């Protein structure tokens, strides 16, 4: 008999509203009969959706941490009930819960994870993105924005987290780790990179291949790309933005020249590799359960795809298999 | 009668070697009869090229500052003659010289500029890139890697330099200035962005439109995108890398499906907008002459195109007209 999993979903926090996330929950329940859901958010709204009550648990927590709030201040604000914190807490408490999916504020998700889901080593988790690359494999970019302004020892920690992840999920025995810089030479970089480079060079258990610049971020020259959160966020979002820009240009060309059929095919081919929207989720490495961060613009498909990733992980498949 | 210009070219520093730069010099002399060149580098080699001696001046300075050298240490190393420093010095001294073109080490070019080409306000120059965007206009990204680890007041200075440039070169009366961040909300950002945001908000003469994240860097939502050099370098190089990646994918699709003719057209169409290689040069804003930084991989066409940019500027045209 197939194993049963519980996944906790924070139904608030998406720009598309809780309706879109709940529609995603419906898709998940339809597609995965072995998955039960704990839905955190506005109880009345969740109840109104007519989801099968024997497969869902509802936790009432109707507040959202917006991008204008301080996540830490919100965490200590006991007068309010924030869905993201309740969801992470529940995920930590429920022994059947394998992970949480949230499309809310990244900082809040990190704060919740730090409080409720630290692993036995009590490592600070890092938000990774698993990105397609030119070698048609995947690159684990870590961190992508959860740890801003961090120091060299944290970057070394990211290298370990990424290495462990790529070894486990992609069965790469000795993942190649690179450090994001503004040039490939070891002498290049900001203060942080210059301090981190020698540490990574001598770090045991890390297959360090040196610095990589932004143009080679998705070249496939490394399996793990270590970056401080602010810079990593630029690579993640810029790559996504450029893919969208160029696909838009291709479609425009098709329309202009009457080649819409073929340009649609080309866009589809590119999207198959570079569709960041459906790839979607980031994963908090180093937490003791799977903490999946969907982007703010997530809709139903993002929730369904992210569930699939969790199922893949549980079934010892690769992330995007 | 057409005005005569002198342009100083640092013939060393390109990965393609001085031969490629000298071939570029030949193209420039052929194409622009009103341009004379001061060529700095290996005198023997330059002489051997048979360029018209009445239109060139040669300065012997056979050493290169590599990406493994410290630019400042090299500058104070009096036993050696570095082409990049000699070239900037000559540009500063020669009243006919309108600018310098170098494809060497960025740090060295900055050090030379600081020493020989400060403007009357003695501002620290910033390296800008003029990038194509989705609105089919141009975005001035400043800084792109000359000023790493700089502070809030420098970012405000970059905003002024970019504003002045876009007003003068693109005739935009009130250029929209944005600050690169990891989210559009004013509360997001690293320490630097959080400190800079309120300064830009109240800065006189700056039309500040707020924070922009990496995915919108080339959206055309701003005319000037202010960034600390390390982060700006990520946006510049990642955008370039992604454009190349996707064009490669398109060509691959064409080959696979027997649609090479049309995919070649599409690649050409995209390249027309996003060909960073031929756009090529960065410009040091705030210097008292035009300091053009070509990329390390520059060949003959990069030199010729960058000369064209200088001619455009002198003729009160836009950068890429």
Image: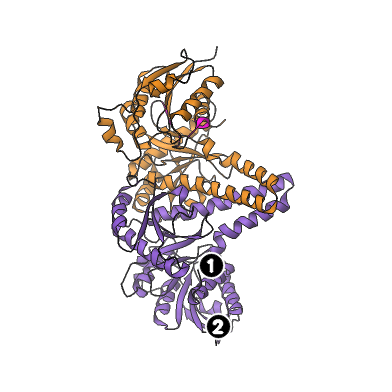
Chain colours: A purple, B orange
Question: Which residue is the site of mark 2?
Answer: A34
Query: Which chain is mark 2 on?
Result: A
Taking B320 as reference, is B149 above or below it?
below
Q: Which mark is residue A41?
A: none
| Image location of residue B55, percent across then percent down | 47, 15
Q: Residues within 10 Å of mark 2 (few under 14, many from 20)?
A: some
Magenta stretch: includes residue A274 = no
Q: Which residue lies at the image location 60% right of the left edge and 55% below the top edge?
A: A270
Q: Which residue lies at the image location 39% right of the left edge and 78% below the top edge?
A: A92
For the C terminus of chain B, which image quadrant? top right
| Image location of residue A32, percent across then percent down | 58, 79
For the N terminus of chain B, which image quadrant? top right
Q: Secondary structure at mark 1?
A: loop
Question: Which residue is the site of mark 1?
Answer: A320
Q: Residue placed farthest to the right in the image?
A: A258
Magenta stretch: includes residue B298 = yes
| N-terminal label among 2 and 1 | 2
Q: Secondary structure at mark 2?
A: loop
Between circles 2 and 1, the one closer to the viewer is 1
| Image location of residue B92, percent across then percent down | 36, 22
A247 vs B103, left or right, is right
Q: Quarter of the image holding residue B110?
A: top left
Q: How many numbered discs sit on the rendered protein?
A: 2
Q: Residues within 10 Å of mark 1 (few under 14, many from 20)?
A: some
Q: Are marks 2 and 1 on the same chain?
A: yes
Q: Is residue B149 visible?
A: yes
Q: Quarter of the image holding residue A96?
A: bottom left
Magenta-drawn segment: B288-302
Q: Which residue lies at the image location 45% right of the left edge and 78% below the top edge?
A: A98
């Amino acid at each position: 008999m197939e194993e049963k999993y519980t996944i906790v979903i924070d139904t608030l926090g998406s720009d598309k509203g809780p309706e879109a996330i709940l529609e995603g929950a419906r898709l998940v329940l339809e597609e995965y009969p072995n998955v039960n859901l704990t839905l955190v958010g506005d109880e009345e709204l969740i109840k109104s959706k007519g989801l099968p009550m024997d497969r869902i648990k509802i936790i009432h927590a109707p507040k959202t941490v917006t991008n204008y709030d301080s996540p830490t201040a919100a965490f200590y604000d006991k007068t309010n009930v924030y869905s993201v914190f309740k969801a992470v807490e529940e995920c930590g408490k429920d022994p059947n819960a394998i992970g949480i999916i949230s499309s809310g504020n990244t900082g809040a998700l990190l704060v919740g994870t730090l409080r409720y889901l630290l692993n036995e080593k009590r490592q600070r988790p890092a938000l990774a993105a698993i990105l397609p690359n030119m070698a048609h494999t995947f690159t684990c970019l870590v961190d992508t924005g959860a740890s801003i302004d961090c120091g060299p020892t944290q970057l070394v920690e990211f290298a370990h987290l990424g290495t462990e992840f790529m070894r486990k999920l992609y069965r790469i025995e000795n993942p190649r780790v690179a450090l994001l810089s503004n040039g490939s030479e070891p002498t290049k970089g900001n203060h942080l990179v210059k301090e981190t480079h020698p540490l990574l060079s001598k770090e045991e258990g890390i297959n360090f291949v040196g610095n990589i610049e932004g143009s080679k971020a998705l070249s496939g020259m490394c399996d793990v790309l270590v970056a401080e959160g602010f810079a990593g966020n630029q690579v993640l979002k810029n790559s996504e933005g450029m893919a969208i820009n160029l696909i838009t240009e291709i479609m425009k060309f098709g329309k202009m020249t009457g080649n819409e059929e073929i340009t649609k095919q080309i866009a589809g081919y590119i999207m198959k590799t570079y569709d960041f929207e459906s790839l979607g989720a980031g994963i908090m490495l180093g937490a003791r359960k799977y903490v999946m961060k969907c982007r703010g613009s997530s809709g139903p498909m993002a929730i369904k795809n992210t569930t699939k990733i969790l199922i893949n992980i549980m079934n010892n498949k690769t992330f995007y298999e």
